[in-house]
């Protein structure tokens, strides 16, 4: 939490300044907070408990998509940048969706299909805006450290809370887009609402591989073990995420 989180935010920020906010959002679409939650839960409570957490995370992917859509639309429609309003809208959308989703009792594969359908629909509904990229020399000297501190504080708070609320709620809450919202908020402040929407578009594109990761973990972890499940899920995720990057970069050039 104290080393990987700030390192990832620093990397995603620098990638965003080099390649644009959409690619930085794509990078943090990898399951870099939720996957460690499942891993350490498996070590502490067993693989069966971790499988339930993976199922909850798959449901949480749907809640995350609603958060992304709400943030992007509020940000894209603002005449003046107001990251607080966009973040509030996204957080409320996530909470409302999570409250509904925690009552769902579908098998794993139908849940995966539902998650993929929601991700595809949200991508279709994302606002069509073009961000004006800020020059790197416009960023404050405190910009990068502030992003790193904010992300670390959020990850520490969320993971500290999740241990006491059971496997389903642990899973549903884990996909809250901590990295994505940090990047979106700072892009919002630096370059405006269109840049924040671009971050969210990249993040949502990563939700295909995110869903595949936790579906494979949920299917394999009980019968094949922790290492086989994680190795298989990681391989599949990297392949899908690579295709997503190709699609994003082609779309940005179009």
Image: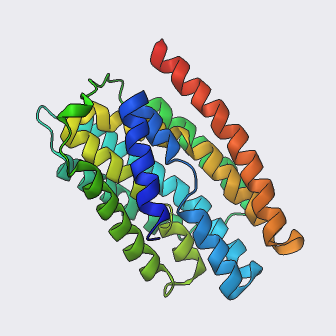
Q: Is residue 164 above or below residue 176?
A: below
Tell me residue 125's x, y (percent). Answer: 43, 32
Question: What residue appears at the point 68 percent right and 63 percent down from the top-left corner?
Answer: 106
Tell me residue 39's x, y (percent). Answer: 66, 72
Which residue lies most toward the top here? 254
Type of colouring: rainbow
Q: Is residue 40 above or below residue 71?
A: below
Question: What residue appears at the point 51 percent right and 84 percent down from the top-left corner?
Answer: 163
- Residue 6, quarter of the rendered image: bottom left
Which residue lies most toward the left here? 80
Q: Is residue 133 above or below residue 162?
A: above
Towards the viewer: 150 or 95: 150
Q: Judge whether residue 7 can be spotted in this image.
A: yes
Q: Is residue 102 left or right of residue 70?
A: right
Q: Judge whether residue 126 can be spotted in this image.
A: no
Tell me residue 135's x, y (percent). Answer: 24, 28
Question: What residue appears at the point 72 percent right and 53 percent down from the top-left corner?
Answer: 234
Q: Is residue 5 left or right of residue 46?
A: left
Instruction: Tally the marks.
Output: 0
Tell me residue 224's x, y (percent). Answer: 88, 69
Question: What residue appears at the point 64 percent right and 79 percent down from the top-left corner?
Answer: 41
Q: Is residue 219 above or below residue 21?
A: below
Q: Is residue 77 left or right of residue 181?
A: left
Which residue lies most toward the right here? 223
């Amino acid at each position: 939490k104290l080393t990987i989180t700030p390192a990832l935010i620093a990397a995603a920020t620098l990638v965003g300044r080099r390649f644009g906010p959409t690619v930085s959002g794509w990078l943090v679409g990898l399951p870099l907070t939720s996957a460690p939650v499942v891993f350490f839960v498996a070590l502490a409570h067993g693989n069966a408990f971790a499988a339930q957490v993976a199922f909850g995370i798959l449901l949480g992917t749907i809640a995350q998509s609603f958060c992304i859509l709400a943030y992007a639309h509020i940000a894209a429609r603002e005449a003046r940048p107001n990251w607080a309003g966009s973040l509030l809208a996204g957080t409320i959308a996530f909470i409302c969706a999570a409250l509904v989703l925690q009552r769902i009792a579908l098998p794993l594969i139908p849940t995966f299909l539902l998650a993929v359908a929601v991700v595809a629909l949200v991508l279709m509904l994302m606002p069509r805006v073009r961000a004006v990229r800020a020059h790197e020399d416009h960023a404050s000297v405190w910009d990068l450290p502030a992003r790193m501190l904010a992300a670390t504080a959020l990850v520490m708070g969320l993971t500290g809370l999740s241990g006491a609320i059971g496997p389903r709620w642990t899973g549903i809450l884990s996909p809250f887009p901590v990295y994505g919202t940090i990047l979106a908020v700072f892009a919002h402040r630096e370059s405006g609402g269109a840049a924040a929407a671009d971050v969210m578009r990249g993040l949502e594109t990563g939700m295909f591989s995110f869903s595949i990761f936790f579906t494979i973990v949920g299917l394999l972890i009980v019968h094949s073990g922790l290492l086989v499940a994680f190795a298989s899920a990681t391989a599949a995720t990297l392949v899908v995420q690579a295709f997503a990057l190709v699609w994003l970069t082609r779309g940005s050039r179009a």
